[in-house]
Image (tube, rainbow, N blue to C red):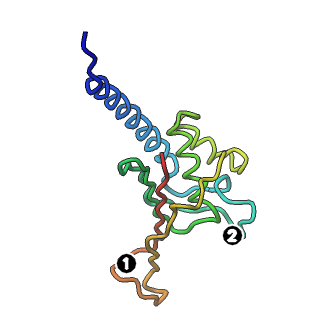
Amino acid sequence: KAFHPAAGGDRLAHAGAVRAARRDARRSDAACYLLGEHDFSAFRAQGCQAGHAVRTIHRLEVDREEDRVSIEIEANAFLYHMVRNIAGVLMAIGRGIAAPVWARQVLEARRRAQAGVTAPASGLYLTAVHYPPARGIPSPGATTFSRGGRAILPR
């Protein structure tokens, strides 16, 4: 029999794509639990100086860009390390370390120790800040109050 590495490689590539799609679906399912207004105490760093941890996430999307995972979050405000801690939870869920419902359990526990690892700051950047018109701070095209952040992490 002849050995055709390309044929085997195609099957491996397909299996890898299926696993990546499952990881992406797990992350997206988990992200749904974090949408809306919640107490994000479990996602704040110990040194956070915010007066309260109630924040509203308007949009949380998890996408794949080739070999990277992109997590985009739009919220009314962020806590210290909130995006990094959310990214850490979503990445752990994507790896199968926990079920998607773990995101809700961490949120409800309101204890940082429940949230696991903080994602590294590398690859994290702020894409836009929009203020309400009443503040008098110009924001081209902004009509609502939101802050956007994006983390691109290796899978």
Secondary structure of residue under mark 1? loop
Please tell me which of labels 2 and 1 falls first in the chain.
2
The N terminus - image quarter: top left
Q: Which residue is mark 2?
A: 50
The image shows residue 15, relative to residue 110, as above or below, that is above
Left or right: where 24 falls relative to 43:
left
- At 38% from the left and 50% from the top, the residue drawn is 63
Residue 103 is left or right of residue 14, and the answer is right
Choose between 153 and 72: the one closer to the eye: 153
Give the answer, above or below, for where 75 lies relative to 64: below
Image coords of residue 66 (percent x, y) = 35, 48
Outermost residue, front direction? 2
Residue 19, image x, y percentages: 41, 32
Residue at 46% across / 88% down in the picture?
137
Label 1: few (<14), some (14–19) or many (≥20) C-alpha neighbours in 10 Å? some
Q: Amino acid at mark 2?
A: Ala
Res 142 label = 1
